[in-house]
Image: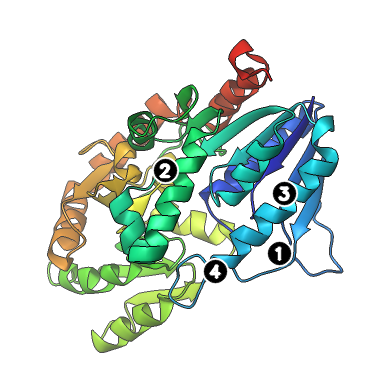
């Protein structure tokens, strides 16, 4: 089959759950002998050429800053990407059997729908509420964003999402197509591992953007250290809120107890997670929460925060592979960290058992099998 994947980012030039998903889809489809074209914005030096075996990477727009200074997505890059996707599909769309696109950044989906010479498969990594649109972009732009999302929902499509939360929202908003929840994005080994003894360290790994609420971890660490004096923290990643993390570290006297190294090699993050007391994800909004599964695969429990937009809570079975804090306040996060500490190695063993029981369901391979089936099922035909 000739398959076109559409997303404005490409792993490892940008790092995130969706980037890893499309990279995994591309590699698996190419390994199965399909002809794969990956449309994206250029994120690499013009002298470089991305190398994914068996995958033709096509940049349909120039290198652009995707995020504004405050950590919000800029509007211009999605518009440019949408125009680039439209132009490519007008010229080459007839040669594709399937176009498989992310719903976001929306204009690319509308472009794919406008040409419509192929099966259209759409991944909804998140479905935003009207209230969140208004909060994210303000009263005017937020209404426009909500309208554009609504237009995308009306497009005839085969829809996938990655959590029960967003599957429910797709159905409530009346998406024009069959919906399947894919529970697996984990691409690591599925064999159970004996959990390592925990060091007194809490770990965060991810982008430092407002939705992740990374600065909330700093006062929580300071408060938890009143009960666990040897406790330390490691915060990996980068973004617009990293400066606030560093400022709080200094103001709370945690310079010797909190390491903030920025982006590091994946091997270093994995080692840190494997020996951490717990992984802490203060995020208010997650479409999936891959780091919860990655931590559990190593026998490390997680602390996440309850919230209407946080699908990561779907991945935590309370008392088995971690805890859900009622809020991102220092008191609630510190209490959850203390609970993990109090349970010791027993909780790590339960976490490893939870992963063993759920590994196949949460695997990337299981999701890819379902996606491949959708390419040829009768309901997905032109």
Quadrant of the image occupied by residue 119: top right
Decide which of tag 3 and tag 1 comes sooner along the chain: 1
Decide which of tag 4 and tag 2 comes sooner along the chain: 4
Up/down of 254 relative to 65, above or below = below
Up/down of 351 relative to 222, above or below = above
**In front: 381, or 139?**
139
Camera-nearest label, 3 or 1 = 3
Where does residue 88 sit, x and y in percent of width and height? 79, 47
Mark linked to residue 350: none
Q: In which quadrant of the rendered image does the N terminus lie?
A: top right
Where does residue 322 sit, x and y in percent of width and height? 26, 44
Mark linked to residue 263: 4
Decide which of tag 1 and tag 4 comes sooner along the chain: 1
Camera-nearest label, 4 or 2 = 2
Q: Which residue is mark 3?
A: 85
Query: Could you tell me if the residues under marks 2 and 3 are in contact, i.e. CB atoms within 8 Å?
Result: no
Query: Could you tell me if the residues under marks 1 and 4 are in contact, i.e. CB atoms within 8 Å?
Result: no
Q: Which residue is mark 2?
A: 288
Decide which of tag 4 and tag 3 comes sooner along the chain: 3
> Badge 1, how many Cα within 10 Å: few under 14, some, many 20+?
many
Where does residue 191 sit, x and y in percent of width and height? 51, 30
Distance from label 2 to label 3 (Cα)?
Answer: 26 Å
Determine whether, in the image, residue 379 is placed left or right of residue 94.
Answer: left
Quadrant of the image occupied by residue 96: top right
Distance from label 1 to label 2 (Cα)?
Answer: 24 Å
Q: How many tags in the picture?
A: 4
Mark linked to residue 43: 1
Distance from label 1 to label 4 (Cα)?
Answer: 17 Å
The residue at 42%/41% (across/down) is 293
């Amino acid at each position: 089959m000739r398959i076109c994947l559409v997303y404005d980012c490409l792993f490892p030039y940008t790092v995130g759950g969706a980037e890893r998903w499309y990279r995994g889809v591309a590699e698996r489809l190419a390994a199965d002998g399909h002809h794969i074209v990956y449309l994206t914005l250029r994120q690499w030096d013009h002298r470089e050429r991305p190398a994914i075996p068996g995958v033709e990477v096509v940049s349909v727009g120039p290198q652009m800053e995707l995020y504004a200074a405050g950590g919000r997505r800029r509007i211009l890059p999605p518009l440019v990407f949408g125009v680039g996707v439209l132009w490519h599909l007008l010229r080459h769309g007839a040669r594709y059997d399937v176009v498989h696109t992310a719903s976001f950044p929306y204009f690319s989906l509308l472009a794919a729908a406008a040409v419509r010479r192929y099966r259209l498969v759409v991944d909804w990594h998140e479905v935003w509420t009207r209230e969140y649109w208004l909060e994210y972009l303000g009263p005017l732009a937020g209404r426009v964003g909500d309208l554009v999302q609504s237009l995308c929902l009306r497009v005839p499509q085969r829809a996938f999402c990655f959590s029960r939360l967003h599957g429910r929202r797709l159905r409530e908003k009346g998406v024009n197509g069959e919906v399947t929840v894919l529970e697996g994005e984990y691409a690591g080994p599925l064999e159970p591992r004996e959990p390592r003894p925990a060091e007194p360290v809490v770990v965060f790994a991810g982008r430092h953007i407002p939705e992740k609420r990374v600065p909330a971890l700093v006062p929580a660490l300071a408060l938890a250290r009143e009960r666990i004096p040897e406790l330390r923290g490691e915060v990996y990643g980068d973004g617009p809120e990293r400066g606030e993390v560093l400022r709080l570290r200094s103001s709370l006297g945690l310079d010797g107890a909190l390491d903030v190294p920025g982006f590091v090699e994946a091997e270093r993050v994995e080692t840190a997670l494997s020996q951490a007391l717990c992984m802490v994800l203060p995020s208010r909004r997650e479409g999936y929460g891959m780091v919860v599964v990655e931590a559990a695969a190593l026998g490390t429990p997680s602390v996440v925060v309850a919230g209407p937009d946080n699908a990561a809570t779907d991945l935590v079975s309370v008392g088995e592979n971690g805890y859900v804090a009622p809020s991102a306040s220092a008191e609630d996060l510190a209490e959850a960290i203390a609970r993990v500490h109090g349970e010791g190695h027993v909780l790590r063993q339960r976490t490893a058992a939870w992963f063993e029981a759920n590994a196949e369901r949460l695997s990337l391979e299981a999701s890819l099998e379902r996606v491949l089936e959708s390419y040829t099922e009768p309901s997905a035909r032109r």
